[in-house]
Amino acid sequence: MDIYLAAERAFHLVPQISLEVARDRLEQKKTSLVTGTLGALIARPKPEDIQIVSFESRLEAFWLINVFVRTVYERSHTYTISVSGAEVHHVTALGQDLPVTANPKSGASFSLNGVEHCVEERRQSFTFDGTGTKMDLSKYQSFEKSEIADLGQFAPAGVLVVPPQAHATTVVRAVLAEVIKPVQAQVIHEERVNVEALDINFRPVYAFEYEWVTKGKRVILEFDGLTGEVHSGGKKQNDQIKGLVTRDLIFDVTADAVGLIVPGGSIAVKLVKAVVDRRK
């Protein structure tokens, strides 16, 4: 089996909604959003009772992996072929004299052994969040994005870059485990997996912390900077971020690492990767 790993890439998805616009939209709906989150509280506050305490602009990572799988193999198969009538006793085909078998249910037939020459090809796309959980994040693929040339120096002003907990080896392992399936074959001529895209993407998220002053209750609302979706029960990550965003740390897939992903058999891992300065 040959496994090809494409060049690793990192992208920054360009916000479609600014922090200021997001804050203005939440201000207009803060009463219903906050009381909806704190549903156990019956009293409905006045707008001035709910004050913004803090906010955070951050970039959250998610993985996109595209793969192409190609398998060329041979398998033996016995074909059962019906004859034209009960009067047929045997058939000569491909230089073979083949006996005819009578079956009360299916009628008279003969069997012919052959070899099927098979080619299977398929493409699949996978997305994972920063924790390595597989989920459908394809909705973000239509948004404008710019490639990050140097992850180590990627630090937009006033924005928290959240490093992924799951690195490349973790998500590649999950993808290969799903796409590599056993083949019922006598001979396998080619078995190849092309990881055509191994991309990490950073999408904009805004977190706003509100306090219901008279009740002493706080709520964090997360605003998606691409779609405008609002999620309650969010969290701020500024105090929780540990670790650096570097290419060597995130893109940790090596030939040895991939060789350990798929146990057994003979695996040739060919790294088709961008030439990068490992000092970055």
Image (cartoon, grey):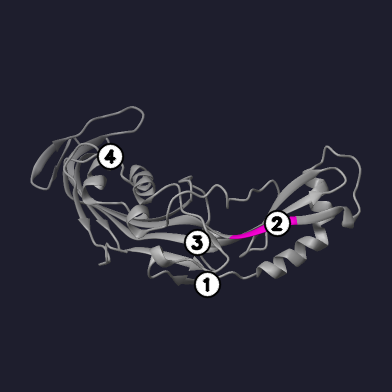
Q: CA distance from mark 4 to mark 2?
A: 53 Å
Q: CA distance from mark 4 to mark 1?
A: 39 Å
Q: CA distance from mark 2 to mark 1?
A: 28 Å
| Residue marked by disc 3 | 202
Comes first in the chain, label 1 or label 3: 1
| Residue marked by disc 2 | 54
> For residue 230, what is the image quadrant?
bottom right
Determine whether the residue tagged by mark 4 lies in a helix, strand or loop: loop
| Residue marked by disc 1 | 144
Q: In x, y percent, where is residue 247?
A: 35, 59
Comes first in the chain, label 4 or label 3: 4
Determine whether the residue tagged by mark 3 lies in a helix, strand or loop: strand
Q: Amino acid at mark 3?
A: Phe
| Residue marked by disc 4 | 182
Q: Residues within 10 Å of mark 2 (few under 14, many from 20)?
A: few
Task: Look at the image and give the residue range highlighted in magenta.
Answer: 53-57
User: Is residue 96 positioned above or below 58 on the image?
Assistant: above
Q: Depth-wise, is mark 2 or mark 3 nearer the camera?
A: 2
| Figure label count | 4
Q: Residue at x 88, y 57 (%)?
A: 48
Q: Depth-wise, is mark 4 or mark 2 nearer the camera?
A: 2
Q: Amino acid at mark 4?
A: Pro
Q: Quadrant of the C terminus?
A: bottom left
Comes first in the chain, label 4 or label 1: 1
Based on the picture, tell me whether residue 59 belongs to the magenta stretch. Answer: no
> For residue 69, what is the image quadrant?
bottom left
